Image (cartoon, rainbow, N blue to C red):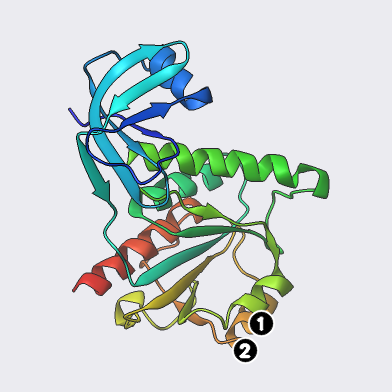
Amino acid sequence: MTDAMFLADLDDPRVGDQVAVTGDEGRHAAIVRRIRKGEVVLVSDGIGTAIRGPVLTSDVNGLVVEVAEVLTAEPRTVRYTVVQALAKGDRSELALEMLTELGVDEVVPWQSTRSVVKWPPDKVERALARWRSIVREATKQSRRFRVPRVSPPLTTAELALRVPEPALTLVLHEGATEWISQVTPPVEGEVMLIVGPEGGLTPEELELFAEAGGRQVLVADGVLRTSTAGTVALAQLQALERA
């Protein structure tokens, strides 16, 4: 059985040290997950470092874990950002979970023209908190040592200004003539994927992104849901990177 993982602050941990998992995370581990003394768990700081070791104490205050092993995430030269158009229902949440499981570095909510869901100004912080909670939980589930960043939402105009910044920006679109498998990923730098909403991208958005340097690509021979398109694209790029 895979060791359970929790998130906590780590300060240059060494073998033999003791690490406390407190607050909501610690109470969840001890009371909800019922982690007991003697069980081996993982504790990560969410920015690339983790420890593995046995639980010394488990009570209402959380866990105390002895450091038996210090682990670090494998360094990567390519950083993946997915711009995810706001989607209805749980589709955005499903996208967040799967992207996190694959190791995305950053997710940017996008208020696209055809997004059914809108984030009014007074609801943005609450919505971002929800997205950040989802990626934290998905990070723990997938045993990754880095929690993806969830950035503030962008409008289409703001997104167009970001398109030229990465080493490569790909716009996922069913009308593209180039397959993502034909793309040569950069050896370093940022790769940005732009995923549209259920209603698709407007001609104006496509033109705006193209003028800014975005390349339209196909990721499948059918039309994928907004909840799965980014994941399929990211997986293919990662495979190309490792080839």
Q: Position of residue 242 (x, y in %)?
A: 21, 70
- Indicate the quadrant where residue 103 lies: bottom left
Alpha carbon separation for disc pair 1 and 2: 5 Å
Taking the spot 47% from the left edge, 18% from the top edge, the residue there is 27
Q: How crowded is mark 2: few (under 14 residues within 10 Å), some or many (20 or more)?
A: few
- Indicate the quadrant where residue 188 lies: bottom left
Whether residue 83 sits left or right of residue 242 in the image: it is: right
Q: Are marks 1 and 2 in contact (CB under 8 Å)?
A: yes
Q: Where is residue 120 in the image (x, y as percent from the top left)?
A: 80, 48
Q: In this view, does 122 lie above or below 4?
A: below
Q: Can residue 203 be seen in this view?
A: no
Q: Quadrant of the N terminus?
A: top left
Q: What is the three-letter code of the residue carrying label 2?
A: Glu
The residue that disc 1 covers is 208
Q: Is mark 2 on a helix, strand or loop?
A: helix
Q: What is the three-letter code of the residue carrying label 1?
A: Leu
Whether residue 71 sits left or right of residue 57 in the image: it is: left
Whether residue 39 sits left or right of residue 224 in the image: it is: left
Q: Position of residue 203 (x, y in %)?
A: 66, 78
The residue that disc 2 covers is 211
Taking the spot 52% from the left edge, 24% from the top edge, the residue there is 23
Q: Where is residue 202 in the image (x, y as percent from the top left)?
A: 66, 72
Q: Is mark 1 on a helix, strand or loop?
A: helix
56 vs 85, nearest the viewer? 56
Taking the spot 31% from the left edge, 26% from the top edge, the residue there is 65
Taking the spot 47% from the left edge, 49% from the top edge, the residue there is 95
